[in-house]
Amino acid sequence: MSLTLHERAQYAGAPLASPAPAPAWTLSVRGLGKIYGDTSEESIAGTGPEFGTAVSPNTGAIVAAWGVDLDVAPGEALGVIGESGSGKSTVLRCIAGDEPATAGEMLFTDHGGSTERLDQLSPTERRRMRISDISVVYQDPALGLTMDVSAGGNVADPLTAAGWRNFGRIRSRATELLQRTEVPIARMDHPVKAFSGGMKQRVQIAKSLANDPSLLLLDEPTTGLDASVAAGVLDLMRGLLEETNVAAIVVSHDFSVIEMLTTRVIVMQHGRVVEAGLTDQLLEDPQHPYSQQLVAAARG
Amino acid sequence: MREMDSALDLQKELPEGRVLAVRGLTKDFTMHLVDGRVAHALKGVDLEVEQGEHVALAGPSGAGKSTLLRCVYRTYLTTSGAIGLRTSTGAVVDLATMPDWDVAMLRGREIGYVSQFLRAEPRRPVIEIVARAGIARGMERGEALDAAAVALRRVGIDEALWPVHATVLSGGQKQRVNIAAGTISPPRLLLLDEPVSALDPVNRVSVLDLIAGLREQGVAVLSVFHDLEAIEMLATRVVVVEGGRVAADGDPHEVLRANHGLAVAR
Ligand SMILES: Nc1ncnc2c1ncn2[C@@H]1O[C@H](COP(=O)(O)OP(=O)(O)OP(=O)(O)O)[C@@H](O)[C@H]1O
Ligand SMILES: Nc1ncnc2c1ncn2[C@@H]1O[C@H](COP(=O)(O)OP(=O)(O)OP(=O)(O)O)[C@@H](O)[C@H]1O
Ligand SMILES: [Mg+2]
Ligand SMILES: [Mg+2]
């Protein structure tokens, strides 16, 4: 998010059509909301940080995300932090189109400069974007990969979905991607279920890059890996983010991951964004009580 | 509203040749985990730095010197007041209220910040750390690597250390890598917070020479040094900060004589 809290208050409700200040954002999200259960207005009241819950006292619905604003520019990574259940993955799923948002506007601009309102696309168009423009790397490789299929096959999948037909070209693109993510080519034809956790993540990253996406969504990409394995995957991602012009959103509980990969962060609590800032500012001078608590806990 | 007003004022506060104009800067820390206790670290600071000027902040421990530098760099959020910067393109911006993304861009291109400690990024070779600062300044990778080599030689970091991860360096070596990164090319504004505190006398002198040279190239420098000798050698003006306020501002020799003892008390 590019705005400080007091600026956010000032800009709250500003329509997307208003002249965006500096950069050409890859993604601009305004007022994103996702409710599980009764999606009527009634579900909103009584939820959020000031009530200490995301569950509606009126309807019992879960307000997993509400009023979420964020922007991310080409070549930049935005971090998302917040405790378990605060709505981080929900926001990513809504952006990716894995599930429809309840409310909000999402303006997306690809490498070529063409712009789409993600929230207004048909499900078919969303699926097309998910193949060609927006990729996700999940914490659980089983969500991003087909376990019985080989590494090469997994990476080929988005290529064929995007219309690639020539076997030789697909094979050489898959090889190139696996080399780039340091997966031994000798194991390219082995089913990924036989791979270690770190290696599965590398295959997932290779797959996510297949169609040269404009936006990369990383949901806890190193959580659950052994420290040394996580470090290798992290270094790989840092290199990719620095070398390419992809815009990235990184969800992580681990502040060292956030510090290493991102320049700006948003903090989520009970489905709301409670603070946005430069990553170093958020860690050195957190403003919101909840951010102060998170930073204190992380510093130990 | 406030943005409008301050932008208008700041144009006047920053005539050509002035790089930084701090106006009425206050910084409160609200500690929500300590019963919402509020510390008033800065209580209305006015300060300016011209191109080619070296302003040294002096004053007792806890006076707010580091806080001031960190507000300028936006590691700390300003509570009220303005931090006007005239960029190399002549634009006047308020670092206190500027959107985060713009600050991130501006930092890389125009502001060097060298603090007492390098919190070295994990698993990043020394040469890469310095070269990345060059890339942020707008250099091509090859050019940045060449400039990094020059900058590292200048601060006496042996070539054998270039591929080593910075996390394993000694304190003084880290500090010199930090200086090399901050000065890979002359920034518009250089912020120095005790940048030579961990250096031996020989390296200290060569780094102080380097900083003196930058000023001569037109860099505006705002610094904190805890030794009088460095201040006397480098500063063109001294600003004494006490209890979050400016207590004195003027010629180094006069200010230091009038406030002797205080300026370097730690
Ligand atoms: N399909 C669903 N149906 C009902 N509730 C859901 C569904 N998916 C998520 N939720 C709820 O939405 C809230 C936000 O979940 P989300 O997965 O976004 O949290 P998170 O911040 O990613 O947490 P974690 O750090 O544990 O991954 C939680 O209360 C969760 O139980
Ligand atoms: N992140 C922070 N959170 C809370 N209080 C802070 C923070 N940073 C600084 N302070 C407080 O602000 C005041 C000024 O501190 P600062 O570090 O700016 O002093 P200084 O003049 O640099 O001192 P020294 O010469 O010892 O480095 C101190 O009371 C300090 O405790
Ligand atoms: Mg999650
Ligand atoms: Mg200090």
Image (cartoon, rainbow, N blue to C red):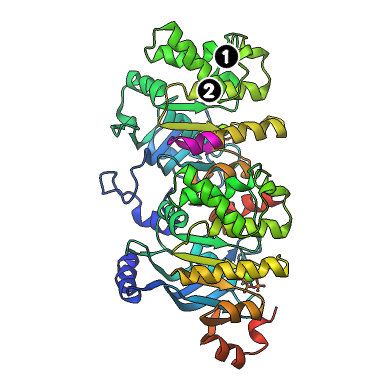
Q: Is mark 2 within 8 Å of ligand 3?
A: no
Q: Is residue B106 magenta?
A: no
* Marker disc for residue B36: none
Tell me, yes or no, whether the two marked residues, 1 and 2, touch with CB atoms within 8 Å: yes
Q: Quadrant of residue B170?
A: bottom right
Residue A109: % across, % down: 33, 35
Q: Is residue B161 above or below residue B255?
A: above
Which residue is more in the foreground, B81 or A14? B81
Residue at mark 2? A206
User: Element under label 2?
Assistant: helix
> Does residue B262 lie above or below A229 as drawn?
below
**Range of residues picked out in magenta:** A239-250
Residue type at tag 2 = Ala
Q: Is residue A247 magenta?
A: yes
| Number of other residues with Cα within 10 Å of mark 2, as a class: few under 14, some 14 to 19, many 20 or more | many
At label 1, the amino acid type is Ala
Residue at 66% x, 49% y: name it.
B159
Query: What is the number of the mark on residue A151?
Result: 1
Residue displayed at 63% across by 67% down = B206
Residue drawn at point x = 41 percent, y = 53 percent: A3
Callout 1 crowding tier (Cα within 10 Å): few <14, some 14–19, many ≥20: many
Say whether disc 1 or disc 2 marks the residue closer to the N-terminus: 1
